[in-house]
Image (spheres, rainbow, N blue to C red):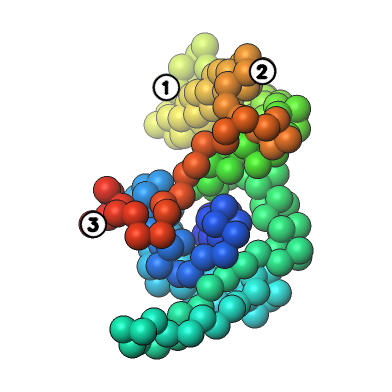
Amino acid sequence: MSAIRLLVLGAVRQHGRAHGYQVRNDLEYWGAHEWSNAKPGSIYHALKQMAKQGLLHAHEIAPSTAGGPPRTEYEVTEKGTEEYFRLLREALTTYDQKMDMLSAGIGFIVDLERAEAVELLRERMRTLEAWRSAVTEHYTPEAGPESLGHIGEIMNMWVHSADAGGEWTRGLIARIEGGAYTFAGEGGEPFVGVLAEGQENPYAE
């Protein structure tokens, strides 16, 4: 599953309504152009495709007094909101996601209620542990990778990846259960991860 749909839906949703340049600016601000496929062409393509699919509503905005073509602003539809939360939950629970999908999920995790976020991460832990057990049916870490020739290094890498992923996930669960961050429904001041109209992006290339 590509992260671009989740990233674009989430960015538009945070603004309420946003045009393509705002979405691109936000994703660059988060560094998503470095760790995902959120390049300008894929962002604009995703906006247009999701508008055709009914996930976004496209508003044609009159051109500015300075001239130029009309600008399109996008707004997430009810169907788009359902897709956004489906992608978000999948990103947090599926152990074999690419790093860009998990990163996108963590970026929007506070859109969930705290208890649900913890439960989704616990589900991630369960699937990671089951995957590790499946690997170690064929490979015993104590015996070392050499016991299977150099191919053993592949399984060794998988086990280390599962262990590191589990350690990181347990730490995140502990921080969330300890009260870190502001989640949906909690009031207070949530973290604002979008740039205001006209605000300069310090990470723009």
Q: Secondary structure at mark 2?
A: helix
Q: Dot 2 corresponds to which residue?
A: 177
Q: Dot 3 corresponds to which residue?
A: 205
Mark nearest the camera among 1 and 3 is: 3
Q: Quadrant of residue 27?
A: bottom left
- In the drawing, does residue 99 fall left or right of residue 199? right
Query: What residue lies at 70% left-to-right and 30% top-to-bottom?
Result: 186
Give the amino acid type for the residue marked by disc 2 in the picture: Glu
* Distance CA(mark 2)–CA(mark 1): 41 Å
* Distance CA(mark 1)–CA(mark 3): 45 Å
Query: What residue lies at 69% left-to-right and 37% top-to-bottom?
Result: 184
Badge 2 or badge 3: first in the primary sequence: 2
Number of residue marks: 3
Badge 2 or badge 1: first in the primary sequence: 1
- In the drawing, does residue 157 fall left or right of residue 74? left
Q: Name the disc covering residue 146, or none.
A: 1
Give the amino acid type for the residue marked by disc 3 in the picture: Glu
- In the drawing, does residue 66 fall left or right of residue 188? left
Percent position of residue 189, x then y: 57, 33
